[in-house]
Image (spheres, coloured by chain):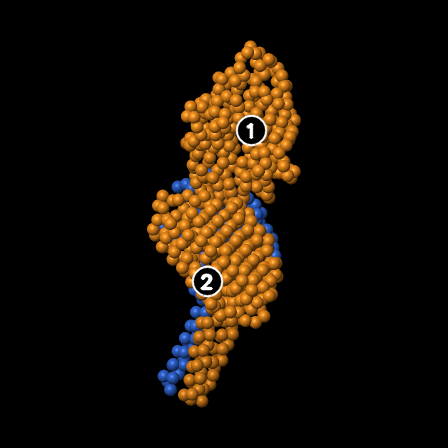
Chain colours: A orange, B blue
């Protein structure tokens, strides 16, 4: 009797234990996650250098130690007044470096140590075994579906086609690579079933290369050797780049991921295109009455982030305006390095002010418009031919306005600093130059009056700035006015600052909803085990 | 003998408790919080005074807890975890503050489990919506209009306004379920304005 009771108690205790363990087994497959400790506060960490070119969009904090803030490049760091961190137009977060004010050196140093420990933890986990978990695909991956677990390669790993990681939100993957890791251009890591980038650990002893347009997910833990992490043009990382050597970026998107990712589509940040136009008439004055004037227009790509398409120039007083030269590569797009020259000839019998308008569009699916105008006055006079032309001509001004952030701001907006460059394309110095902006004040003169005479001379470039907070997409118009020879002149610059608008939420069936039928099956099974045990106990009690 | 029976009985009770406990874990709306407390990236803000906690719409018998969400990496507003809660977009203004506060709730759930905004489309102009905050004070909104959007339509007037007034916009899905995209074809937005006392 005693013996039987003991057995039944064992069964009951076992079923109790099972009932506790079962749900955990359902929700967390794969190895224990690698604890990043304070390294998890950063989306990019490096011990040596972090560089970017192009328009990179990073969400999260960057840290560099023991290298210094001077070992970053391309971010245009703006040191905070506290001296403990910098900000950058490219980073929706902060940048911490070992040469900043305390406690930053300690904080970022601790995070780097945590990153090293995390790499060591990952690299020393029990390696994967069997055909699926050891040297899968002989290091060439394409089309595989990786379930949660530890995967080990004693070679380089090259992802040549899309691969899928399928698992639940709490499942983990550790991928140990003793060589280099690369993902080919435009290939993707697809996360399915609720798998999250923060539970995917790429432990790479060699270099990591994410080629142009590729979409990579997971936390990259690079080893202590030659283990640079290079993100090439336009590649996307949903995760973290934790590198013990250099991290290089070229126009990338990096963020630590979110809890609702199922699969990814490429999302390039929206570009703000800017165009400029100069309008210089020849001659600037007709001193012997009516005559012919040729307007020469120069159009250029002020934003310079990407080519402008469908560029046109029209003039309200002259037709037709024809493209003379400048499309060097013949691609019909106004490339950042190009200056397109247009001209138009007209007969004038009276003093005439004309306005030329240049338009262009961003070379992407948004077709964001850019607009610029140039205004010039040609004086037609019958005064004595002996009057010097410089005493007759009208002044000309040109202004270009550039916001410090040339991609769409995140929802909610941010502070924006506009920089205005005012030039004088004419032949006479301009007096009483004054700049205003309908969406920002005050505009502040910074520099450019090189001879200090208070006049905008023909070779001077006057720089103004203005800072404001932008919360919604804003089109601003800068106006510069001046005069010379008792003739007024003005110029405008048009700039858009875009603020991203969230897409509407997907409030249908969620993709990570609980699997009810599985749960019911588990519960039923457990209930049967316990009931059976109870029946056994009752039977034995009767004996 | 008697003590043995009661012991067996108590073990039985313990195992039943174990099953109930496991059921709680399985059906808990956020199992990862119990199982793996470190994975959550979008950490709900601490509930302090003034932050919304409950949404009540008497007409459709809605009385829902308010979660806080931000953006997915794809740039869309995130959604509540389960069918019962609603989610406030915490990158925008709070309900009652000037601007457009946005709250989303699910429409339709697997196995025909009802979702919080199944009947949102039955709201009409003039219907009343209440939002309670953490201090127990309630802000009242009045429905102004209902509008359908495509899932990728520009939603700037849902998330932004600059008329200096306080708005509350409720979002759910509508239309045809696309099993491949795991999304409905449309989004229904209920625009409401803060009631001036």
Badge 2 element: helix
Residue A373's spot in the image, x, y percent?
A: 55, 29
Relative to A432, residue B100 above or below: below
Q: Which residue is mark 2?
A: A119
Q: Alpha-carbon neighbours of circle 2 within 10 Å: few (<14), some, or many (≥20)?
A: many
Question: What residue do we see at 45% from left, 58% from top?
Answer: B40
Image quadrant containing the N terminus of chain A:
bottom left
Which residue extends farthest left? A102
Relative to B31, residue B119 above or below: above
Chain of the residue on which disc 2 is drawn: A
- In the image, A216 versus B25, the foreground residue is A216
Badge 1 element: strand
Q: Which residue is mark 1?
A: A278
Instruction: Name the quadrant containing residue A328.
Output: top right
How far apart in space, not on screen, are marks 1 and 2 (Cα)?
56 Å
Residue A534's spot in the image, x, y percent?
A: 46, 80
Residue A486's spot in the image, x, y percent?
A: 48, 17
Q: Is residue A353 visible?
A: yes
Question: What residue do we see at 57% from left, 38% from top?
Answer: A337
Instruction: Count the marks.
Output: 2
Name the mark on residue A498.
none
- In the image, A499 versus A273, the foreground residue is A273
Q: Are marks 1 and 2 on the same chain?
A: yes
Residue A232's spot in the image, x, y percent?
A: 55, 51
- In the image, A467 versus B144, the foreground residue is A467
Chain of the residue on which disc 1 is drawn: A
Q: Is residue B95 visible?
A: no
Question: What residue do we see at 54% from left, 71% from top?
Answer: A129
Q: Earlier in the sequence, mark 1 or mark 2?
A: 2
């Amino acid at each position: 009797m005693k013996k039987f009771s003991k057995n039944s108690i064992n069964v009951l205790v076992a079923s109790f234990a099972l009932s506790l363990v079962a749900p955990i087994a359902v929700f967390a497959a794969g190895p224990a996650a690698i604890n990043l400790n304070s390294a998890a506060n950063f989306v990019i960490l490096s011990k040596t250098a972090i560089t970017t070119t192009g328009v990179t969009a990073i969400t999260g904090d960057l840290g560099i130690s023991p290298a210094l803030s001077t070992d970053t490049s391309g971010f245009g760091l703006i040191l905070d007044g506290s001296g403990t961190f910098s900000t950058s137009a490219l980073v929706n977060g902060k940048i911490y470096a070992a040469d900043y004010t305390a406690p930053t050196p300690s904080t970022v140093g601790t995070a780097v140590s945590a990153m090293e420990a995390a790499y060591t933890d990952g690299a020393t986990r029990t390696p994967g075994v069997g055909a699926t978990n050891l040297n899968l695909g002989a290091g060439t991956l394409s089309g595989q579906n990786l379930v949660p677990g530890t995967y080990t390669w004693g070679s380089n790993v090259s992802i040549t086609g899309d691969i899928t990681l399928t698992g639940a939100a709490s499942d983990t993957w550790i991928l140990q690579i003793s060589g280099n890791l690369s993902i080919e251009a435009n290939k993707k890591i697809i996360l399915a079933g609720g798998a999250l980038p923060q539970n995917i650990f790429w432990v790479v002893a060699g270099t990591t290369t994410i080629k142009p347009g590729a979409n990579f997910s997971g936390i990259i833990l690079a080893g202590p050797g030659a283990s640079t992490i290079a993100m090439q043009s336009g590649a996307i990382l949903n995760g973290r780049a934790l590198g013990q050597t250099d991290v290089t970026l070229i126009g990338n998107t990096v963020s630590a991921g979110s809890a609702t990712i199922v699969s990814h589509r490429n999302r390039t940040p929206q570009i703000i295109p800017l165009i400029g136009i100069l309008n210089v008439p020849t001659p600037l004055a007709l001193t012997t009455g009516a005559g012919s004037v040729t307007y020469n227009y120069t159009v250029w790509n002020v934003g310079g982030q990407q080519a402008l398409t469908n560029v046109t120039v029209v003039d309200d007083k002259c037709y037709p305006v024809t493209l003379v030269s400048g499309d060097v590569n013949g691609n019909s797009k106004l490339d950042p390095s190009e200056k397109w020259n247009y001209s138009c000839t007209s007969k004038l019998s009276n003093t005439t002010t004309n306005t030329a308008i240049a338009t262009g569009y961003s070379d992407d699916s948004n077709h964001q418009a850019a607009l610029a105008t140039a205004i010039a006055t040609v004086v037609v006079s019958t005064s004595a031919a002996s009057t010097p032309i410089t005493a007759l001509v009208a002044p000309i001004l040109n202004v270009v306005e550039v916001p410090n952030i040339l991609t769409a701001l995140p929802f909610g907006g941010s502070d924006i600093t506009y920089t205005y460059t005012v030039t004088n394309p004419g032949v006479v110095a301009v007096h009483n130059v004054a700049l205003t902006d309908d969406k920002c004040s005050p505009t502040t003169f910074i520099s450019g009056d090189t001879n200090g005479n208070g006049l905008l001379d023909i070779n001077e470039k006057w720089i103004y700035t203005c800072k404001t907070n932008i919360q919604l997409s804003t089109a601003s118009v800068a106006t510069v006015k001046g005069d010379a020879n008792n003739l007024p002149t003005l110029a405008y610059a048009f700039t858009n600052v875009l603020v991203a608008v969230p897409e509407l939420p997907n409030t249908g069936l969620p993709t990570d909803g609980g699997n009810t039928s599985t749960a019911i099956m588990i519960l039923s099974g457990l209930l049967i085990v316990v009931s059976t045990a109870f029946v056994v106990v009752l039977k034995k009690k009767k004996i | 003998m008697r003590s043995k029976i009661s012991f067996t009985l108590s073990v039985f009770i313990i195992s039943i408790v174990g099953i109930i406990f496991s059921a709680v874990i399985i059906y808990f709306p956020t199992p990862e919080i119990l199982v793996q407390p470190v994975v959550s990236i979008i950490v709900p803000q601490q509930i302090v005074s003034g932050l919304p906690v409950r949404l009540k719409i008497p007409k459709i018998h809605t009385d829902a807890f308010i979660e806080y969400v931000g953006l997915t990496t794809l740039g869309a507003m995130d959604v509540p975890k389960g069918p019962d809660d609603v989610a406030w977009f915490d990158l925008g203004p709070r309900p009652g503050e000037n601007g457009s506060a946005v709250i989303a709730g699910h429409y339709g759930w697997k196995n025909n489990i009802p979702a919080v905004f199944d009947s949102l489309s039955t709201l009409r102009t003039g219907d009343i919506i209440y939002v309670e905050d953490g201090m127990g004070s309630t802000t009242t909104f009045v429905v102004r209009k209902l509008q359908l959007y495509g899932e990728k339509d520009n939603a700037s007037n849902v998330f932004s306004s600059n008329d200096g007034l306080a708005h509350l916009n409720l979002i759910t899905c509508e239309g045809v379920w696309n099993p491949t995209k795991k999304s409905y074809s449309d989004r229904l937005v209920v625009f409401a304005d803060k009631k001036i006392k």
